[in-house]
Amino acid sequence: MKKKKKKLAKSTRWHRKAHRFIAIPFLVFIVLMSITGILLTWKAELGLKPQSQKASVLKTPLVSLNTIESNAKHYIDNLGLDTTINRIDYRPRKGIAKVRFETHFTELQIDCYTGKVISKSTRTADVIEMIHDGSILDYFFNAKQEPTKLAYSTLVGLSLLFLSFTGFWLWLKPKQMKRHKSN
């Protein structure tokens, strides 16, 4: 019986050391990922994403995608920003096209009936998402393959799994020791 108690105590000490060894270096990253995850969950309620605007809803045909692209580039060029478009979220039923850019976090909303820019805003939620998944460093260093994002997300994910496992054992082992003590 004493041998079993010693083995349990030794195992508990090892799990405690391993838990501390992983928890301390990864604490900042886990807290950062937790906070940004909460912000992303509540982004609409906190106003972190641009509000969708209403189109003019004319009984005219929609303007072409080329016109939307051209108007977006012209507008952004007048602001002195890079005109490289990342994507156009085209919503013909709503009469709105959302244009996002490659090298900055600006979003333009363009009326699909008139082709006019009806809103310019910063996509704060995109910045928070990049901090959350670690791709913000890839963005700053202009990395194409996103190596930082992959390494960061993998290491934090593995550390959370390890901390969950060792945390469970740190909870369970004292209960087992108590049970053996009473025998």
Image: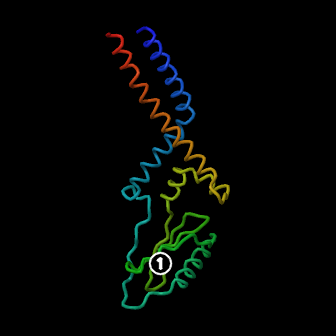
- The percent coordinates of residue 112 (x first, y second) are 45, 82
Quarter holding residue 80 = bottom right
Residue at the location (45% across, 86% down)? 114
Residue at the location (48% across, 73% down)? 89
Tell me if residue 37 comes above or below residue 65 in the rendering: above
- The percent coordinates of residue 149 (x first, y second) are 59, 51
- The percent coordinates of residue 137 (x first, y second) are 62, 52
Q: Amino acid at mark 1?
A: Ile
Q: State left or right for residue 148 relative to residue 36.
A: right
Number of numbered labels in the structure image: 1
Local secondary structure at mark 1: strand
Q: Nearer the viewer, residue 87 or 80?
A: 87
Q: State left or right for residue 177 relative to residue 144.
A: left
Quarter holding residue 58 = bottom left
Question: Mark 1 = which residue?
Answer: 110
Locate the N terminus and report the quarter of the image it occupies.
top left
Tell me if residue 47 comes above or below residue 115 in the rendering: above
Q: Residues within 10 Å of mark 1 (few under 14, many from 20)?
A: many
